[in-house]
Amino acid sequence: MRVGLQIPSFTHPGGPEEIAPTFGRMAREADQGGLHSLWVMDHFFQIRGVGPSEDPMLEGYTALAYAAALTERISLGTMVTGVTYREPGILVKTVTTLDVLSGGRAWLGIGAAWNEEESRGLGVAFPPTAERFERLEETLRIARQMWEGDEAPFEGEHYRLERPLNSPPALRRPHPPILIGGGGEKKTLRFVAKYADACNLFDGDELPHKLDVLREHCEREGRDYDEIEKTALTLLEGTPSADQAADAIGRLAEKGVDHAIFSQGTGQDLAPVLGEALTQTEKIVPAGR
């Protein structure tokens, strides 16, 4: 079982001057505590459920590049990039740059996008749902092509790339892992089976069912279900403890999750707690996993 940390909020006492030192400290603690992954949301406005739109929000890939310079081992990704936020070729180039500068630690986390408020606020196109999924599939195809080193023109319905050159290439082999976020059963999980290395689902009662649906898509696509890393985003309420974290990790492992990602709540400081939980191996990894 792998353990990751998502940092969704940059609202700290002391204002904007405290964002860099606080985020930097959290990234270093996660790295030094043995966590596998560090994630930030790819949003431009703060999202509902975390805080008001006006709360501080960092651009995701700049934040990850800053974290990469302060860490040595932990992998880095967005949870997740909305497909409409960046042109596909530029997105692949951005993730590749993060991978090269971090020594091969980047993920491509991606989804169909949902936040219309920030898109309209900043002038980013926000097409209807069906078109966003079409764009997602084309972007996944472009990413695979560019990371294979194939410079042949790409001709899609929405994107046309005359020469998808990607130099330098990513260090991670065969490429930075592709994680698709979301539990949509008809399209999202089918795209996971067809194109991705990992899925991200929410911790909840529907999690086992979503994994069953993914297994069915894998069977139809001729894909080995066990090749796909199953990640789940979860929360710890109140003041978290290492015992509470270890119990959550064990529970997710029993459900078939390979990678538990904890989203840090307001006022929490999760990296030390998760680092301590990692020492409780008998609670983290059930027998047989």
Image: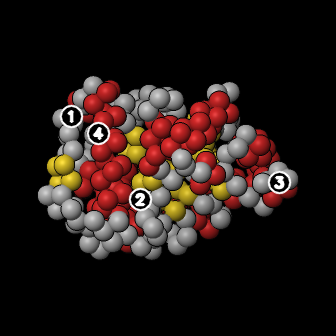
- What residue is rendered at 42% in x and 54% in y? 108
- Give the number of marks: 4
- Work out how far the residue at label 4 is from the one at label 2, CA to CA, in angstroms: 24 Å
Q: Which mark is residue 47?
A: none
Residue 97 horizontal/vertical position (percent): 33, 67
Q: State which quadrant residue 165 falls in.
A: bottom left
* Horizontal arrangement in the rendering, residue 69 relative to residue 254 (left or right): left
Marks 1 and 2, Cα distance to the nearest angstrom?
24 Å
Mark 1 or mark 2: name the one nearer the start of the chain: 2
The crowd level at tag 1 (other Cα within 10 Å; few <14, some 14-19, many 20+) is few
Q: Which residue is mark 2?
A: 64
Point out which mark residue 288 bears.
Answer: 3
Decide if residue 43 is on the left or right side of residue 162. right
Residue in the foreground of this view, choosing between 59 and 51: 59
Q: Earlier in the sequence, mark 4 or mark 2?
A: 2
Q: Residue at x 46, y 70 (%)?
A: 173
Mark 3 burial class by Cα count in 10 Å: few <14, some 14-19, many 20+: few
Q: What secondary structure is found at the residue carrying circle 4?
A: helix
* Label 4: how many Cα within 10 Å (few below 14, some 14–19, many 20+): many
Give coordinates of residue 219: x percent, y percent.
Answer: 58, 41
Q: Amino acid at mark 2?
A: Leu
Q: Nearer the viewer, mark 4 or mark 1?
A: 4
N-terminal label among 2 and 3: 2
Instruction: Check disc 3 and report its element: helix, strand or loop.
Output: loop
Residue 191's x, y, as percent? 44, 41
Between marks 4 and 2 in the image, the one whose residue lies nearer the viewer:
4
| Residue depth check, mark 1 versus mark 3: number of the one nearer the observer | 3
Identify the residue at horizontal 33%, vertical 55% (top origin): 143
Lower position in the chain sequence, tag 4 or tag 1: 1
Q: Which residue is mark 1?
A: 125
